[in-house]
Amino acid sequence: MGRGGRHRGRSQRKDFKESRENVWKRPKSDATVDASDNAVSEKPTWEPIVTVNPNFEDYYKGQGIVKAEEWNLFMEILRKPLPAAFRVNSNSQFCDEIRSILENDFVKSLHAEAIEGGELEAIKPLPWYPKNLAWHSNFSRKEIRKNQTLERFHEFLKLENEVGNITRQEAVSMVPPLFLDVQPDHFVLDMCAAPGSKTFQLLEIIHEASEPGSLPNGMVVANDVDFKRSNLLIHQTKRMCTSNLIVTNHEGQQFPGCRLNKSRASEKGLSEDMPINQLSFDRVLCDVPCSGDGTLRKAPDIWRKWNSGMGNGLHSLQIILAMRGLSLLKVGGRMIYSTCSMNPIEDEAVVAEILRRCGSSVELLDVSDKLPELIRRPGVKKWKVRDKGGWFTSYKDVPQNRRGGVLVSMFPSGKNLKDSTETTQKNENGDVNSCEDGCKETENSVVDATPDEPAEEVSDLPLERCMRIMPHDQNTGGFFIAVLHKVSPLPEFQEKPNPKRNSSTKNANSTEKSLGKESEKELVTVDAVLDESAVENVIEADSNNEKEESLEPEKKNTEGESIAEDKEANSSNAGGKRKVPMQGKWKGFDPVVFLKDETVVNGIKEFYGIKDESFPLYGHLVARNSDTSSVKRIYYVSKSVKEVLQLNFAVGQQLKIASVGLKMFERQSSKEGTSKPCSFRISSEGLPVILPYITKQILYIPMADFKHLLEQNSIKFLDFVNPQVVQKATDLVVGSCVVIPSDGEEPVKVDASTIAISCWRGTNSLAVMVTAADCQELLQRLAEKTPKTEGSSVNGSNGGDSDGPQAMETA
């Protein structure tokens, strides 16, 4: 390298070091006067984001979560930006290649930048995550995005994330699914799923553990209460290309159990031996809304908003969500309760109340022997409650006028005076109604404390089996996890809903209202950090801010996003010209119907040469419109999803379904005017699943022609290098086809790992039907290695479909 090159390198590293010191500074407009022309101009200055909150420090010093000798390090780490982390999709056809690039390329090429920034390593695999599939970078996401010397790494992350080969996810967020012990035949519920990185991870585990070339028998139901965040969830998970997913839009505490009783089954003429007669789950992930102080490094704006009332206000909701999760859990099943908060009121206090309510039917598991390289701390058994600047060590010390916001369940013992006419009673929602001042204890009362008891309560439950991940232990965010095992059915009063609560909508929602007016303002500030930040999974957040905030879907988005489009169009159409879609009783949601039109199904089977016995289509194809002539997209559902849909129909469509299955076929029309025997083309998202079962409309072309096709997006038949390819392409029927690179003999066996792309055979040309990102990613992978032969390969169709060449349009 010449002198100029060395100088530029030093200059860039200097700029990079300065950028590391300013990643948390926000722009602030400052009017200044230009002396040359006396003109007032706006020059940006920088104002550091405040990372000091006395209430936060007082609170956690008082709770004793961090030892005194660790306090300075704890606060120092919290004030630093969170390093970027990501996972390699274990089911990606490029999994090994991506991991090799990280291990052999970027680990070495980024080493100089790490040393300049004071780090020993630029990127490294997380030691506790299996198979080197999760990676931690010592650069923050903003540093990666803004620094020129990291541009190649940044572009790599953007592209691989877009096509689904990697997922950006906070390191601690990856932990809960690993403790669920998910198996390929499990039914899994993610109760508060948006933005979807954990859901994606659960789907990976289910598919990875299944037999190669086969669909797993299990499935994931991903639920979120917020409609817009559900769209983000759909966008995130569609990169997985799975038929084993249902996305729903319910309040977690009201998630339906879809129980089919015998009388209802007989009324509808249904068989009592349906595959399932109740929606219950082998595994439940209950990652609840929380105050989010474990995400301070990722969302530093929480510093100025944080107060102890945030955790207190969410405590009741967290308990209700966890109890609903346990009621939906099968006996013998496992549930994870987790938060991104370090607050014991949201963590151990909730777990303790769950155990008290469930008695011996639920046990808290000790998983301290699992993931030994993950540094975590045992749960605490004593803590205090803070309210309006005051500390309380026992519920009996709480003044009567404060007991509406400070509940008995927040304290370690959970003890309170027994019900009597003169003492504390519980209302119909389970909240405590305090007795009048001066009440006396009866012989049945439980005394909270005596003068001989310690001032602080200590729980007698095994809360040390919980785990708390602290930011300064492994340079991460903060997180809390408890693993619960359902030993037997819950007590009857916990399993069955209270009829009084169901008597009116007001009573059904009374628990949320009990959070109090004081919490309403705080809940607004909490909303942005309920789960993982939406920005966590969007690499180029800056360029997409407006789109993400509005969440207005593009025309080519999945059906869940089209629901949002329909809903917005209907709400803005005052004339009511467009009919509002209905999914059973759910207004604004497109219906979910099994496609039973034999003409359409048989046409697809015949055109692509699909044999029903090898890949059954009947009963597995779903549309979002009951009018077959208007169906634009056809979705394929796995056996497990099919059974859940059948149950849902039987119980009156209790599930509010935003998205279901895998987009397999799309209606396609051509401007060329040529009639075609099949109106539906294969979606690039569905191609990996259906590819092994297609026997027609397949074109094998040399690697040189394949690369040329990816580069140009469209090739005229006469431009193919190999004259034999020209004849084979001409022999194809006009319409959708599959193109596979092959430099030698045609592969004997085609499977889901074969390199293949969805294309359109026009009158005189061949055009790709995948996104530009997919084409770019395939070209990069093919350039890095010699293509495999004998049927080995990769499928470059993880992403969504493009709108196709200009000669075509989607009907």
Image (cartoon, rainbow, N blue to C red):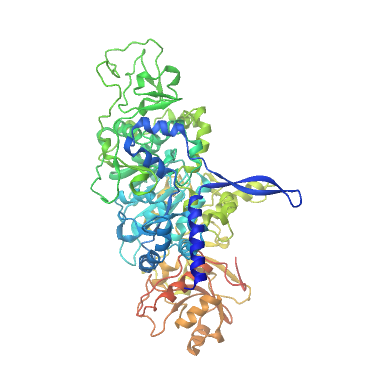
Which residue does the image show at 52% across and 44% down from the upper left?
Answer: 585
Compare residues 152 and 486 and report the one nearer the observer. 152
Q: Residue 162 vs residue 576: left or right?
A: left
Q: Is residue 524 visible?
A: yes
Which residue does the image show at 39% across and 83% down from the upper left?
Answer: 746
Identify whether 262 is placed above or below 356: below
Residue 383, given in percent of the width and then of the height, sits at 33, 30
**Residue sticking out furthest to the right:** 37
Identify whether 462 is placed above or below 205: above
Q: Residue 556 vs residue 58: left or right?
A: right
Quarter containing the C terminus: bottom right
Answer with the quarter of the image where residue 486 lies: top left
Compare residues 550 and 306 and report the one nearer the observer. 306
Residue 220, given in percent of the width and then of the height, sits at 39, 52
Q: Residue 227 vs residue 368: left or right?
A: right
Compare residues 33 and 141 and report the one nearer the observer. 33
The total of numbered circles placed on residues is: 0
Q: Is residue 596 visible?
A: no
Identify whether 512 is placed above or below 612: above
**Residue sticking out furthest to the left:** 369
Residue 412, given in percent of the width and then of the height, sits at 31, 28
Answer with the quarter of the image where residue 79 lies: top left
Identify whether 439 is placed above or below 489: above
**Residue sticking out furthest to the front:** 3
Residue 289, given in percent of the width and then of the height, sits at 44, 40
